[in-house]
Image (cartoon, rainbow, N blue to C red):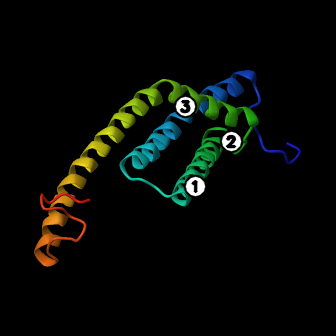
Amino acid sequence: MNGLPEHDFTVWTEWMRLLGSFAVGLPAGILLDGFRFLRSLLPHHASVVFLEDFLYALAFSLMVQLYASGFCGDVLRWYQIAGAGIGLAVYLLTIGRLTGSLLKRLRGVRTAIGRFFHEILCVIQQKIRFVFVGIPKNQDSDGNLQ
C-alpha cells in the first residue's frame, strides 16, 4: 500500500494507547521511590544526586519509548508522553505520598540512630585518647572539656 507502514489509526486504538500510557507511570513511580529510599538511607553529595536524577530521567524516557515500540507499533506520540507523566503524577499524589511520609520517618530514625552511635563513639574516643595521650590540656579535673 504505497510503501507506507500499516497502522491502526482509529479513535478506539488511540484512546487505548493513551490509557495504556498512564500505566507507564506506575513503574516510573516505583523507580522514583527506590531513588528516594536510597537518598533517605544514605546522605548524598550534590553531584551524586544529579547523577541519580539523570539516570531516572533516562530510565523514564526509555520506559516510554519501550511502551511505544512494544504496544503502539513503533509510533511515539506526544499524548503517550503526557499520559506517562500523568500516570506518574497520579502515583506520586496517592501512593507516593504514603511512601514519602514513611521515608520521612525512616530519615528521623536514621538520624536518631546516628546520634546514639555518635555519642557512644565519642565516649570510646575519649577513653582511647586518655589511655594513649593522657589528660588533654583543655580538660578540667572532672574530665569535662573546656
Residue 79: name its quadrant. Answer: top right
Q: Residue at x 24, y 54 (%)?
A: 118
Given the image, on which type of amino acid does mark 2 rest?
Gly
Q: In the shown orientation, is residue 120 left or right of residue 66?
A: left
State the residue position of label 1: 50
Q: Residue at x 49, y 42 (%)?
A: 32
Residue 84: name its quadrant. Answer: top right
Q: Is residue 13 above or below residue 135?
A: above
Q: In the shown orientation, is residue 126 left or right of residue 14?
A: left
Between disc 2 and disc 1, whose residue precedes? 1
Q: Residue at x 41, y 27 (%)?
A: 98
Question: Picture coordinates of residue 111 (x, y %)?
Answer: 32, 44
Task: List the single residue furthest toward the right.
Answer: 2
Between disc 3 and disc 1, whose residue precedes? 3
**Residue at disc 3, secondary structure:** helix
How far apart, in angstroms, are the residues tagged by discs 3 and 1?
26 Å
